[in-house]
Every structure is written in structure tokens, then in C-alpha cells.
Image: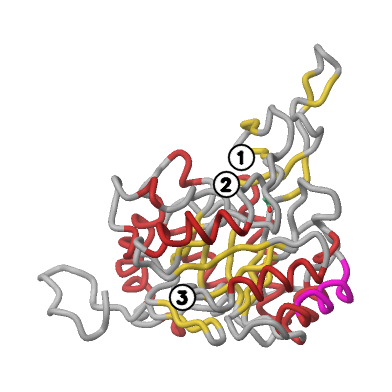
Amino acid sequence: MSATGPAPAPGAPPPVDLTVRLGRLTLPNPVMTASGTYGKGLEFRPFYDVSRLGAVVVKTITSEPRAGNPPPRLVETAGGLLNSIGLENPGIDEYVRTYLPLLRTLRAPLVINIAGHSPEDFAALAARLDPEPGIAALELNMSCPNVAHGLDYSTSPDAARHVVALVRSKTGLPLIAKLSPNVTDVRPVAKAAVEAGADAVSVINTLLGMAVDWRRRAPVLGRGVGGLSGPCIKPVALRIVKDVSRAVDAPVIGIGGIQNADDAMEFFVAGAAAIQVGTANYYLPTAAVDILDGLPSRFAVLGATRMADVVGTLKDPVLKA
Ligand code: SIN
């Protein structure tokens, strides 16, 4: 819906301008999908018009094809999902040849998520994708807990700065740094990424966890540990979004257990300029577009007509001595 659209039906919430600016990236609305939970987007076309989304963020691409981790790779937990996929993907050559043309047919802004095994590898991926048409932005997966060294670039500010700066030197595309919650404080890492040239940061990737089969005295996941996502991580994600959005001079994209429009509003108020819908896509394929459709009525409750009326408006608690 846009502020210049047709007059609302009687009783309908007033028009809302949901346009968001994430540095150099402008999106028609703040509802994105989270990398790894949305297939190639094509799978969701039977459910709704994918071009309505703010952006589609695709599963991480690496330089070489990856078979991923040994099974089992998924375990349901109370209120969440543990995954240990291990960045399975066909590699950049096959991706550019076969999948990118298909993704362009979605007609939604496309955010390509990449992961390198070194800063130079990240940079090479960015350089490879830079001339490709139809890419709105790159999201740097600096926070995969399921591969060796996957967390290195978002557990140290210096490492984050180095990888983002190197990628920045290879592409003019907007950059989103996807960061890990598996640190005491995400803020120094986020600051380093923004200072090095990230247009936005996305928080949070999954929380490192495990499931145990006590009868076998063994971990359930093939790799032993995995990344926890879903509604159970939402409180952690909200706290980190609030902290990071107040610490960095760049927009923050909120991720973590968002399954309905009220969840999305919580993230906006906490400081998220946009959100990504992840695990909910698995059990409610229409989750992302349902959230989008639910925003105007929630904005009306606050008397808000644009994102700036909501984003980061969280009040501080009144603490009594
Ligand atoms: C995976 O492929 O293991 C998940 C990716 C991620 O958590 O970054």
C-alpha cells in the first residue's frame, strides 16, 4: 500500500507509506525473507505474489559447491528449530548460470547472501556478483555457526572490519552485514562493520545450541551442534536489535522468531528499520505476506503513517532507586 494509492474502503486503516531506506538500498516495504528459510523463492509462488515482498534474501552462496553437514540436520525444539545445514549450495558458477535467471523472474528486490572461507574469498564472491543485473544488495553471512570458522567474522570487531572493507572495495552494491548473537556484545562488531562500509546490519543469525538423545548418550545433530531459530529466540533478538540500533549510525534489520505482524511491530519499535521472516516460512508459507498485510492496521493503532513514526520509538523503562 502506498500513501498515493486509491482511497481506502470505509473502515479500512489509513494508507501507510512502508518504504524503507537501508543506506543505498531502498525497498518498497520492510518485510524481507531470511536467508536459508525461503528456498529460491520460487517454491512460494503457489502461495502468493512474491513480488509484493520488500526483498527476497536467498540461501547463502559460496565459491565452491558444498554438500553440507552430515544428517540429521534439523531438530525441532520447544518453540524453535535447530539447524545444522552447513551451507549446502551449488557454488557461485552454477548459481549464476542456473539460479540467478530464475530468481530474476520473481520481480522482488533480490538480496544475495554470500559466505567466504576467508576475507579474500568474500571479496571474490562480491566481485563476481557485482556486474550481474538484478541484484539489489549483498548480505554477508559473517555468522554461520555450522561450518568451521563460520563465526570468525562476527565475533571480532577487527575481523568484521577487515572482511567488510575488502568486500566494499570490490563492489558498489549495498552491503548488509549479518551478525551473530554468539558474543557478549554485538555492538562493537556492528560498529566495525558499519565503519568499514556496510549499509546496514542484520541481527540476529542463530544461537549456537544442541539437542541430546540421552538414551544413545549422543547429540542428535550429525555435527553435534547447530543454530537455534524460531519464536524462542525472539526476546534475545529484540534486545540485540534495541542495543545495536542505538549504537550504530546505520539501519538495523531485525531477525529472530518473527511470525506475525505484532512481532514485526515489536521489532520496529525496538529499532529495526526492516525485518526478515525466517523459521515461520516453514510452518506458515504465507507468513511474510500476512505480516505485510497486517501492518497498516497496526500502524493505525499508533497513529503512524510511515516507518519513521514507528522505528526506534521504544521508551526507556522508568527505574526507581
Ligand atoms: C547453515 O547453512 O548451516 C545455516 C546458515 C547460517 O546459519 O548462517
| Quarter of the C terminus within the rendering | bottom right
Q: Nearer the viewer, mark 1 or mark 3?
A: 3
Quick one: label 3 or label 2, which is nearer the N terminus?
3
Check disc 3 and report the residue beneath it.
133
Residue at the image point whose x is 40% and y is 57% from the top: 102
Q: CA distance from mark 1 to mark 3?
A: 36 Å
Residue 37 against residue 127 in the figure, above or below:
above
Residue at the image point whose x is 54% and y is 79% from the top: 313
Closer to the camera, 79 or 228? 228
Looking at the rendering, the stretch of residues picked out in magenta corresponds to 156-164
Is 200 positioned to the left or the right of 195 in the image? Answer: left
Q: Magenta segment: does it hold 20?
A: no
Label 2 crowd bin: few (<14), some (14–19), many (20+), radius 10 Å: some
Q: Are marks 2 and 1 in contact (CB under 8 Å)?
A: yes
Residue 40 x, y percent position in the rendering? 47, 51
Color encoding of the figure: secondary structure
Q: Secondary structure at mark 3?
A: loop
Residue at the image point whose x is 60% and y is 86% from the top: 172
Kind of residue at badge 2:
Pro
Check disc 2 and report the residue beneath it.
231
Q: Magenta segment: does it hold 161?
A: yes
Q: CA distance from mark 2 to mark 1?
A: 6 Å
Residue 245 against residue 214 in the figure, above or below:
below
